[in-house]
Image: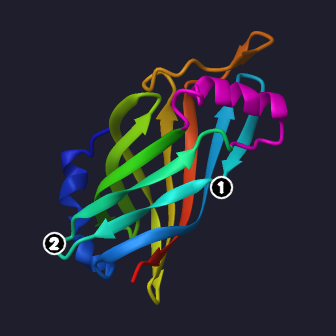
C-alpha cells in the first residue's frame, strides 16, 4: 500500500508528536482480527506480542514487533485450528512488522509504514491510528487490514463457506522506554 501524494503533503514531521528519541519495548499488547464469510462475522484475539521500537534523534523509526501466530483465540477451537493451519504455524510461527516511518496527520491521527513478514513473504504494510505518551510510556492504537490472497494464505473453508479475502486488524500496544 502506498500513500497518495496528497496525503504525503499533509504529513507533519514526527517531532510534532513530542516523542523522546529512545527505544521502547512492548509491555502489553493485543492484536484483534475481524473476519467474515457471506453468512457470519467473528473476532479473534492474540496477546502474544513481543518486540521493541526505536525512534532516533533524526526521527527514524526502527525495531521489530512480532506476534505468535499459534496464540489466536476466537472462542471457537475449530476456527482457531483452521487459523493456525492457514498461517502454517509449523513453518512460520510468527508474523513480524518492521516499522520504517511514523507521521502525524493534520487530523491528529498517525500513520505507521513498514514491512510485514508473513507466510514467508515480505511486503509493505500501512497502519493508522492514535498515540498517547505519558512519562516514558507510549500507548498506540492502530488499525489496518490484510488481504489473505496477497500474502498467499489459503482462506479457511467450512461447509462450503470461505473466509473473505479482507481481514480487518486492530493492534493495541503499550510501550515502555528502555533505560
Look at the image and name its color scheme.
rainbow
Q: Label 1 crowding class (10 Å Cα cut-off): few <14, some 14-19, many 20+?
A: some
Which residue lies at the image location 42% right of the left edge and 51% below the top edge? 127
Q: Position of residue 114 (x, y in %)?
A: 32, 49
In the image, is 99 to the left or to the right of 80?
A: left
> Which residues are the magenta region?
72-93
State the residue in front, 118 or 178.
178
Q: Where is residue 120 in the image (x, y as percent from the top left)?
A: 42, 28
Residue 69: quadrant of the picture: top right
Which residue lies at the image location 37% right of the left edge and 47% below the top edge? 126
Residue matched to label 1: 47
Which residue lies at the image location 46% right of the left edge and 67% below the top edge? 130
Which residue lies at the image location 38% right of the left edge and 29% below the top edge? 121
Q: Label 2 crowding class (10 Å Cα cut-off): few <14, some 14-19, many 20+?
A: few
Quadrant of the image containing the N terminus: top left
The circle on residue 58 is: 2
Amino acid at each position: 500500500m502506498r500513500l497518495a501524494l496528497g496525503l504525503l503533503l499533509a504529513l507533519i514531521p514526527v517531532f510534532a508528536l513530542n516523542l523522546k528519541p529512545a527505544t521502547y519495548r512492548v509491555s502489553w499488547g493485543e492484536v484483534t482480527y475481524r473476519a467474515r464469510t457471506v453468512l457470519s462475522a467473528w473476532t479473534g484475539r492474540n496477546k502474544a506480542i513481543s518486540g521493541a521500537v526505536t525512534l532516533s534523534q533524526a526521527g527514524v523509526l526502527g525495531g521489530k514487533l512480532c506476534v505468535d501466530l499459534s496464540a489466536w483465540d476466537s472462542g471457537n477451537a475449530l476456527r482457531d485450528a483452521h487459523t493456525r493451519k492457514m498461517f502454517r504455524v509449523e513453518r512460520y510461527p510468527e508474523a513480524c512488522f518492521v516499522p520504517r516511518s511514523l507521521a502525524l496527520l493534520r487530523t491528529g491521527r498517525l500513520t505507521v509504514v513498514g514491512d510485514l513478514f508473513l507466510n514467508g513473504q515480505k511486503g509493505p504494510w500501512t497502519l493508522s491510528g492514535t498515540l498517547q505518551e505519558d512519562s516514558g510510556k507510549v500507548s498506540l492504537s492502530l488499525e489496518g487490514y490484510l488481504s489473505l490472497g496477497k500474502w498467499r494464505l489459503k482462506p479457511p473453508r467450512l461447509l462450503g463457506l470461505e473466509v473473505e479475502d479482507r481481514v480487518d486488524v486492530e493492534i493495541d500496544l503499550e510501550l515502555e522506554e528502555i533505560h
